[in-house]
Each structure stands twice: as C-alpha cells, then as structure tokens.
Amino acid sequence: MPTLFDPVSLGRLQATNRIIMAPLTRARATRNHVPTAIMADYYAQRASAGLIIGEATGISRQAVGWPYAPGLWSDEQVNAWKLVTQAVHEKGGVIFAQLWHMGRMAHSAVTGSQPVSASATAMPGEAHTYDGKKPFEVARPITVDEIPGLIADYVRAARNAMSAGFDGVQIHAANGQLIDQFLRDLSNGRTDEYGGSVENRVRLLEQVTRAVADVVGADRTAVRLSPNGESYGVDDSDPVPLFTAAADRLNAIGIAFLELREPGPDGTFGATEVPRLSPVIRKRFKGPIILNSDYDLASAQADLNSGLADAISFGRPFLANPDLVERLKVGAPLNPDHMETYYSQEAEGYTDYPTLADAEATPA
C-alpha cells in the first residue's frame, strides 16, 4: 500500500512523493500581472512537494480579474516566470502552471472590459478590485464565434508556460470559474451547441483540454474540477451524469492527472451536503486522481489506502508550512495560516512562515 511519502507517476512527471501543493491565489504579482522576485522565493521554499501546482494564472487580460494575480500572455510575464521555475528546479522541485479564466468572476475595474460567461448571469456578492470591493457585474455571454479565440488564448498561455520553464499545465475548470460556468446548468442557460445537454455543456472543457494537450502533450496536461455542490454561485441540478461525462472525455484524451476539490459538510473553506463524486469518477477516469480539501495526514492516507486517490493536494497547510512534507513525515505540529495576509502583496504571511529548521536554530 503506497504512503504519502512514496513516489507516483503523474503523466510524464515522476513525483518524489504524493503530497501535492494545491493552487493558491496569493496576489503578489504587479498590477500588470507580472510575477515578482518574492514569488520565486515563495515557491522555492515549497519545492519539497511532490508537485507544485502554481497559483491561478490568467490566460489573457480579459481572463484575470483578481488584483495582483499573475498572467501568461505577454513576453514580460513569461520572462518573470522563468525566475520562478528556475528557483523551484534548483531546489529539486517540479511545478505546473494553472491556466485561468475567471469568466463572470472578473470585474471591469480590473480587466477594463465587461466580464464574459456562458450566459448573462452575475456572480453573487462583491469582487475584489484595486479600489476595494465592488458588486459583481452581469456578464456578457460569449458568442460561438468567439470560442475559437478563447481556446487560442488557452493554447498561447500553455505554450508560454512551457517557454517559461513549467513542467506542465493544469486547466482550471473548477470553483465557479469560466469553464465551470459552462459545465453547470445553474450558470449555463445557452441553447446552442455549448448549452442544454450534458454533451453540449462538457464541450468547451473537452475542446480546451484537447487543444492544450496537442501543444504541450497530454502527459503534461492536467485538469481541476470541483464536482460536488455549489462553488461561488455555480451549481448543477444533476452532477453525477455531468461529471462522469467530463471524466470520460478527459480519460479519452489521456491527461496526466485529474484533481478534484471536494469539500464536505464541515468544510472550512466552503461546505456542502452533496456527497463526494470521486468514487463514481474513479470508475470512469483511469489515470491518476489527486483529491483536495481539508485533508490531514490520517484522512489523506485513508484515501490512498482505499485506492480512491493516487495523491493528495494540500492548500492552506502548504501556505503556512513551506516544509509541510517534512512536518507530516515526522508528525510535527503545523503553523497556523493567517488569512489577513493571504493577498497583502508583502513578505509577511508569504515567505516568513518558519520551518522546523528555523525553530531549531532559534535560541530558547
């Protein structure tokens, strides 16, 4: 029976352990969405992960409506990312770029244009902007004629990721982002070939994934889904046939791995009573599956033991514990994370969380 500390094959990648760093938005780039030097330090500190899945990274200016989030559409961004990937590789780590389009979760105050989505809907609540929080705007439905250009943006960002030195890419199709808005019927009211039936609603996910896999290799392409329950105002009335169909399409493409974010009824960052779909998806998707959400050492090992998961991704524990792998291995306590510094643009709460070695070096 594999343990969290055993190696695992994830497509072309041979991960040294099964403790994966989940993508975490941290807002340390510039207002032009260019990565900064402190980001290289942050990711290098966490290079002991079996794989780092980098923070959500915009595929275009239209795509990224989060202040100080990075992008992958310009030469300046690519060159800045090279410093990050080089720093991770020098520490023996591997890192994927997560390709991101926020859809209706973006705001014109950040992107400069009206948000787009599957349908003319608005995200509930308020968006973060450079001028504070503002109510989300009603999105403009993407036209069928625009979809080839959207797919081309994903392809360009994937190529740029490889030019920047990433070891692969993950397509962000979870957490109420654009592809998730197309997948689920609460946000997709289209009557064309991208709406209505399950077959139509999974079409964009399949097209984007095939296009990206064609340019970087299916064995360097991954996907993230959040199949159970509401996520940022996006939900589906019958998720089992939807997400098993998505799993079938991704299995046929032969992607490197599928990551599933599955909060439970007592979730600490989102909660739902909708049962996990990983058991039914496991029967349809034959590649490696990484599971995410509120895991500790015992629950992570239990899902490895059962065969439900091949690896586990940790988010906030990696945020606060750059040496999470070592801490889990020796049973050391974990640093608590500080939510007030998640998106502060400073080193505090970003690169200053102590390691076990730091604690040993500090006089009593």
Image (cartoon, helix red, strand yellow):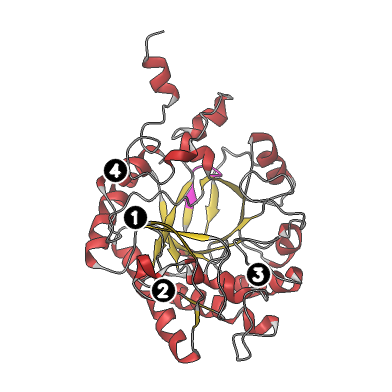
Q: In the rendered structure, does residue 15 fall within the stretch colored magenta?
A: yes
Q: Amino acid at mark 2?
A: Tyr
Query: Of label 2 and label 1, which has the lower sequence position?
Result: 1
For disc 3, the marked residue is 247
For disc 4, the marked residue is 38
Mark 4 vs mark 3: in front: 4
Q: Residue at x 53, y 62 (%)?
A: 256
Q: Amino acid at mark 1?
A: Tyr
For disc 2, the marked residue is 154
Gap between marks 2 and 1 measured at Cα:
20 Å
Query: Of label 4 and label 3, which has the lower sequence position?
Result: 4
Instruction: State which quarter of the image contains the C terminus.
Output: top left
Q: Nearer the viewer, residue 293 or 86?
A: 293
Gap between marks 4 and 1 measured at Cα:
13 Å
Q: In the rendered structure, does residue 246 fall within the stretch colored magenta?
A: no
Where residue 283 appears, x then y in whole percent?
A: 74, 64
Q: Is residue 316 above or below residue 56?
A: above
Q: Nearer the viewer, residue 27 or 216?
A: 27
Instruction: Specify whether residue 362 is in view.
Output: yes
Mark 3 vs mark 1: in front: 1
From the viewer's perspective, is 201 left or right of 266?
A: left
Query: Of label 2 and label 3, which has the lower sequence position?
Result: 2
Q: Amino acid at mark 3?
A: Ala
Query: Of label 2 and label 4, which has the lower sequence position?
Result: 4
Mark 2 vs mark 1: in front: 1
Q: Which residues are magenta?
A: 14-19
Where residue 210 appears, x then y in whole percent?
A: 50, 77
For disc 1, the marked residue is 68
Q: Residue at x 42, y 27 (%)?
A: 355
Gap between marks 3 and 1 measured at Cα:
33 Å
Tag 2–tag 4 contact (CB < 8 Å): no
